[in-house]
Image (cartoon, grey):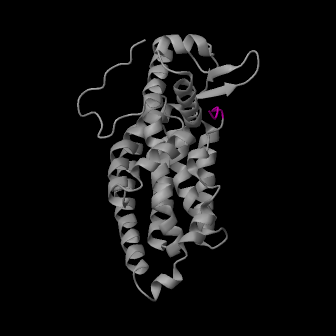
Amino acid sequence: MALAQRPPGAGRHKAKRSDLIAEEVLRWALLNRMKPGDRLPQEKELLEMFECSRGTLREALKSLEVQGVVRIVTGPRGGARLTRVPEDRAMKLLTNYFWFRESDARTIYEARSLLEPLMVRVAIDHLTDDDFAAMRDTVDLCHHGCAGAVDAATHRAAEIQFHQIIANRVPNPFFRFFCIFVNHVLFTSITPKAVAIGQTRPFSDHVIHAHEEIIEALEARDADRASELMAAHVEEAGSLAADLEFNFDRALFDPILSQQIDVAGALERLQGHDPSRVVSPGLKDD
């Protein structure tokens, strides 16, 4: 099988042949409507299909295994089997793309302002009583956080978990992924700053009040009201988050205030709290 030609200027660096083979293997599997669990042809057949050396093919399959797309099994009935990439793994890979690009509070909340009012509209009819109970649990955690009864990491994670519970009920898999991914980026880039800088009561009070109102609208199945409340919430939270980020950045470069900010400690406390790992009751975690 001849490799598909890339358009001129598609990339600055010449792709490795093994990377091209990996792409072609995935396209072939997709066009043949293969599913997770299906086994790719044996090595000999793949070598003939893609007209490459054994070393190149094995490197390509290893690359796909690292990406989580295939699982290589040894033995007489072994080979490469297709696997479903977990959402959290895909997000971690994609998040790396944004690390050294503009992903501050302003840009993240701008994306949320486009996604989340629509998110509540499409999810509202799919939310269950268990989901509403889980959302109220996150609000309770936020109340406890304001009272100092739970740590800042648990408090801040609960604020985002509220949105994650709704996003999990979005029926369209592409839109669901976008909603969850934006909140994952928020958690990895902005939340550590909030935890490191300490209590920000205006932000916390706003989130609690907004989330309580949104729950009431969702329970009433009032899509217009829920969407309106979410839009207002994201706008106000975005403004407050930008202020928080500004204060963090200013303190970070202050010779005295910087000694009070423990970024490494904040990151450590946030381990295990990633909202992209939260799955609504009744949903299967890929």
Q: Nearer the viewer, residue 21 or 145?
A: 21
From the viewer's perspective, is 185 left or right of 83?
Answer: left
Name the residue furthest right.
75
Q: Is residue 21 magenta?
A: no
Q: Main secondary structure of the magenta part?
A: loop
Q: Nearer the viewer, residue 135 or 98?
A: 98
Vertical placement of residue 216 versus 149, above or below = above
Write the residue at 44% across / 31% down. 174
The residue that appears at 50% across and 75% down in the rendered structure is 197
Q: Residue at image x 33%, y 55%? A: 107
- Which quadrant would residue 104 be assigned to in this image? bottom left
**Looking at the rendering, in which quadrant would you find the C terminus?**
top right
Give residue 77's quadrant in the image: top right
Instruction: Identify whether 224 is placed above or below 250.
Output: above
Q: Position of residue 234 (x, y in %)?
A: 38, 54
Q: Which residues are magenta?
A: 282-286
**Residue 280, image x, y percentages:** 61, 39
Q: From this viewpoint, is residue 274 visible?
A: yes
Location of residue 200 in the rendering, given as x and y in whole percent from the top left corner: 48, 73
Q: Taking 193 as reference, is 50 above or below it? A: above
Q: Position of residue 1 (x, y in %)?
A: 43, 11
Left or right of 216 on screen, residue 103: left
> Is residue 219 shown to the viewer in this render?
no
Residue at image point 49% right, 68% down: 194
